[in-house]
């Protein structure tokens, strides 16, 4: 999705972000993440975000910390998303869509009076995220799509291949990473991949490992 408010450089972005910790849900640049928001603290965050910079930091809790309430420890890297769609349900919920803008590194969690968490962040090492399609030419798209076909067939997943063939490489890689059925650690590796080529290679490697484990070619870890 194209933003009405594109960001040309990281200096335009706020140094403090409200955080939405959610295990297994990742956001990547120009990806779209639909969310059903119902907890009072996050409803308050959405209200404040609408009146402010309209940016929310999606980030994963560390594995095993998903239910640790306010003491939950977080990964260091997440992705800022701009609130691009919002609908009220009439029963106290918001249905929203966040569109990924740029990844960030958490510098410090702040002591705040808001019911939701806020952190001071830095975007500097991810400034290339603001450039649409950066690194797409280096991706081995054919290899990635081939592995996706094998993975989808073994997983009995229905895939719209026409849409995949038509999608720009960046859109394809990031959408597949966001939709992938892997665990929190693996999905975090996709978030933290240094560039699009590395993310695509990581996605292929994770799919290969998953298929090998299903076929009994390698031991299973739990």
Image (tube, rainbow, N blue to C red):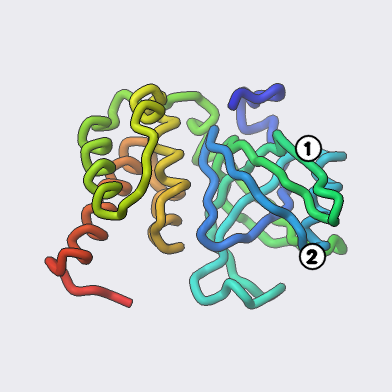
Q: Position of residue 214 (x, y in %)?
A: 22, 65
Is residue 85 or residue 6 the one in the foreground?
A: 85
Secondary structure of the residue carrying numbered label 2 = loop
Residue occupied by mark 2: 111
Residue at the image point whose x is 27% and y is 36% from the top: 145
Residue occupied by mark 1: 53
Note whether residue 55 is visible: yes
Task: Specify the quadrant that holds the N terminus.
Answer: top right
Left or right: 183 in relation to 36: left
View extreme (left): residue: 217
Note whether residue 206 is visible: no
Q: Position of residue 98 (x, y in %)?
A: 65, 41
Mark positioned earlier in the residue sequence (2 or 1): 1
Left or right: 156 in relation to 71: left
Residue 125, above or below 114: above
Is residue 195 or residue 50 the one in the foreground?
A: 50
Nearer the camera: disc 2 or disc 1: 1
Q: Would you call the spot at circle 1 few (<14 residues within 10 Å), some (14-19), or many (20 or more)?
A: few
Q: Quadrant of residue 50?
A: top right
Task: Specify the quadrant that holds the C terminus.
Answer: bottom left
Residue 153, above or below 213: above
Specify the label residue 70 is tagged with: none
Is residue 138 or residue 174 the one in the foreground?
A: 174
Residue at the image point whose x is 45% and y is 48% from the top: 179
Residue at the image point whose x is 21% and y is 66% from the top: 213
Residue at the image point whose x is 62% and y is 32% from the top: 10
Marks 2 and 1, how far apart at CA = 20 Å
Is residue 214 or residue 22 the one in the foreground?
A: 214
Q: Position of residue 26 (x, y in %)?
A: 52, 51
């Amino acid at each position: 999705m194209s933003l009405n408010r594109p960001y040309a450089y990281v200096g335009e972005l706020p140094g403090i972000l409200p955080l939405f910790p959610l295990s297994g849900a990742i956001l990547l640049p120009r990806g779209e993440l639909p969310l059903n928001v119902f907890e009072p603290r996050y409803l308050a965050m959405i209200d404040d975000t609408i009146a402010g910079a309209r940016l929310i930091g999606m980030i994963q809790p560390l594995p095993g910390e998903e239910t640790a309430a306010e003491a939950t420890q977080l990964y260091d890297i997440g992705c800022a998303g701009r609130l691009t769609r919002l609908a009220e349900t009439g029963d106290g919920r918001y249905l929203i869509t966040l569109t990924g803008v740029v990844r960030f590194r958490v510098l410090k969690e702040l002591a705040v009076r808001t019911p939701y968490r806020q952190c001071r962040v830095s975007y500097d090492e991810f400034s290339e995220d603001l450039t649409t399609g950066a690194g797409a030419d280096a991706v081995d798209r054919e290899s990635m799509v081939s592995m996706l076909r094998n993975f989808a067939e073994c997983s009995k997943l229905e895939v719209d291949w026409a849409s995949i063939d038509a999608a720009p490489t960046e859109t394809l890689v990031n959408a597949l990473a966001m939709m992938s059925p892997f665990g929190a650690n693996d999905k975090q590796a996709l978030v933290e991949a240094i560039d699009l080529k590395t993310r695509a290679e990581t996605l292929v490697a994770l799919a290969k490992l998953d298929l090998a484990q299903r076929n009994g070619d390698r031991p299973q870890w739990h």
